[in-house]
Image (cartoon, coloured by chain):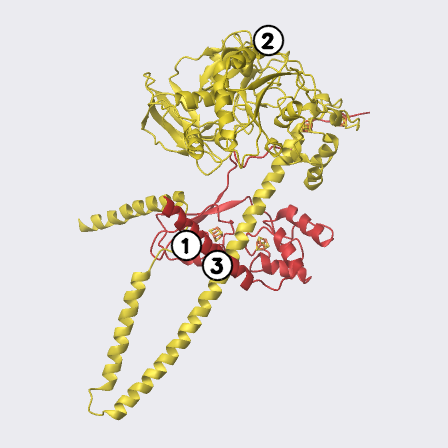
Chain colours: A yellow, B red
Amino acid sequence: MTRKLFTFNGGVHPEGHKDVSNATPIANLPLLPRYVVPLRQHIGTPARALVQVGDTVLRGQMIGAAEGYVSTAVHAPTSGRVVALEPHEVPHPSGLADMCVVIESDGLDQAVEFQPLDWRNLDPSALRNRIRDLGLAGLGGAVFPSFIKLNPEGGGIDTLILNGAECEPWITCDDRLMRERAAEILQGVAVMRHMLGAREVLIGIEDNKPEAIAAMRAAAAGEAEVIAEVVSIRTLYPTGGGKQLTYILTGRETPTGGRSTDVGAQVFNIGTAYALYRAVALGEPMLSRVVTVTGHVAAPGNYEARLGTPVADLLQAAGGALPGSVGKLVGGPMMGFELENDAEDNAAPLTKAVNCIIVKHPDLFPAKPSALPCIRCGACARACPADLQPFEMYWFSRAKDFGKAQSYDLFDCIECGCCSFVCPSHIPLVDFFRFAKSEIWERERHKHDADQARTRHEFKDFRLEREKKEKAEKLAAKVAENKARDAATAAAIAGNAESADPEAERKKAILQAALDRAKKAKESIAPQNTDNLSPAVAKQIEEIEARRTQADTRPEHEEGK
Amino acid sequence: MLSAILVMAGIGLVLGAILGWASIKFRVEDDPLVEKIDAVLPQTQCGQCGFPGCKPYAEAIARGEADINKCPPGGEEGVKHLAELLGVEPKPLGEGLEPKPKAVAVIDENTCIGCTLCIQACPVDAIVGAAKQMHVIVASQCTGCELCLPPCPVDCIHMEVIKEDVATWKWRYPIHTMKQVE
Ligand code: SF4
Ligand code: SF4
Ligand code: SF4
Ligand code: SF4
């Protein structure tokens, strides 16, 4: 049974360095005294904290809930006490701090009760919500909330693709996971297939991982339920790109600006399938992941560590960085980034997105020679797996002519780094593309804000206009009313001269009307602009009011003394 | 839960309808050039250009009565955009006009006396509160125009520069050393 495979254009053959870390089984980290759990571990809106400083938590307890649609939950990695809820260093190319829940272990590691999910019978949307609340996000590095990708959206998805390509050099966590836990992965795959209603399941693995292929094939053969085909694909970076893998396995080309689902395929990482197995079969939230620690360390290998484990502890588990190391990479050398703030007590924690930490040494990662001008040799275009023209995009990104850069399909660039890898002038092309993309995103954000401001401003003008008109109308009505009444009083005086002093009557009536008005006005005082508040703002107002009442009452007490 | 969603949806629909109606009813003469210029302006509505808002400035530019370099929040970038749009040469920002880092207004909750003067001043209704109640500024809606600062009788509003965070952080312009070719 040989399947016809397709070959994308371009691609490169960087040195693998896989054998540095793939020889030893996945090792577990001991329970640590302290975990730092970022609320933003996925693409989308960060989770909303559910705990406060001083709270005690149990392992698996939800400490951050999904906020908005594109979001997912985060959980406590062990039992203990929340000692801080504050911005903390995180593994991010910016080196900026982000909101984290810091938990001090109590050493007991007590867990909440995990409830396995009856995935075959659960209502699909309820099942997805459970998966969201169990915190599942793609473990391949993009960390997109899994429950969204598991929505069949009208059933157009006929092919489920499992990404076991692991094409990036140095990284071997998926390799080890497939060798050691193939059956569990396939159980996760069964759930995915069920949820998507996919007909075909293809598992793509690069042929530099023969053991993983064998293990997965053996497991798939024994599995009656999932008819999954394990496909060995030629090793060529970046086979693990979603669009590239889809093309290799199915020959379907994802359109410009589109996703693989546009051509009926949904791609998941192997590690995500394993996490889904744990979530569904054991009812366990995403609490840990396998991460490769490699490079210039004493005991390179793969470690199963709880999310929130400080990178320093991870390195320690791997025997520590060897002398002469210069910095760390998060992810692989092609697509990863330098870990900023590279102090020994580095507190940045492991997150769902981190699949690899590489400790660098000048021998392994020689400094890049300085760049030369582009000679328009076209090597970058030939290497580009997305069929782009990097040198054109580079030209316009460098000149900050973003519109032009975009017209060369900048946003189809998957930032794989093939172009920089082959450029004979050593131009850091991808750095320019990332720069240009984030500038364009910021512009989009500003545009959006400006549009909102314009609408709100126009509405305010409209409101003022309306109020003015209403006031004018009221005034006119009043004048008319007064006139009528005056006429009526005059008539009454004329008709009945014996009645009580008409002037006094009239004054009394006016007074009564004024009182009524004042009463009405008092009743109708309502906060302005307070409809449609987000819960956060409403809460803020409440808290502030509470503080104010306190502040208000204090001086009165003092005066009373 | 369902009723809450329905109520919210209902409020949304009603407000949407009002806005939609307002945008039709109060559409100023549909001059496509004014619309295009207005689309490029940052909508801060701060009046630093010397006009009472972005739209009036756009109208003045369209009539040829105002120069294109009068809007500090738009910065050089904005001038460039306007120049492209109008087919003229870009120029530096006008004398004494300088873009400031983007900021939002914050009310000191203990000093605010609830006078509502700032609510009246805010061009985009970004302040919520009622008479004699403490007011709050909705940061995501504040354009940073600073128009609420002068009317406050107790000077309790100040501007806070928005700090970069993980979500808004941008990749820097790559510093790459170019080797000199002889
Ligand atoms: S590979 Fe480098 S030198 Fe050649 S065209 Fe591309 S950017 Fe220019
Ligand atoms: S980084 Fe972008 S432009 Fe460069 S080879 Fe990869 S996809 Fe093409
Ligand atoms: S200076 Fe710019 S942002 Fe401010 S009102 Fe004028 S056009 Fe609008
Ligand atoms: S809150 Fe103040 S600074 Fe912000 S938009 Fe309103 S008036 Fe301008």
Residue, disc 1: A529
Decide if residue B134 is on the left or right side of residue A207: left
Against A25, is B23 above or below? below
Check if mark 2 and mark 1 are on a common chain. Answer: yes
Q: Earlier in the sequence, mark 2 or mark 1?
A: 2
Where's the N terminus of chain A, which quadrant?
top right
Q: Point out residue A453 in the picture as x, y percentages from the top left corner.
A: 53, 52
Residue lying at the far right of the rendered structure = B182
Decide if residue A220 is on the left or right side of residue B2: right
Front of the two marks 2 and 1: 2
Residue, disc 2: A19
Q: Secondary structure at mark 2?
A: helix
Q: Point out residue B8 in the picture as x, y percentages from the top left corner.
A: 41, 49
- Quadrant of residue A100 in the image? top left
Chain for numbered disc 1: A
Q: Point out residue A401 in the picture as x, y percentages from the top left corner.
A: 70, 40
Q: Residues within 10 Å of mark 2 (few under 14, many from 20)?
A: few
Residue at the image position 41 percent from the left and 54 percent from the top: A529
Q: Kindly report the distance in space between the C-alpha atoms of the residues bearing marks 3 and 1.
A: 15 Å
Q: Is residue B125 visible?
A: no
Residue, disc 3: B18
Residue at the image position 46 percent from the left and 53 percent from the top: B13
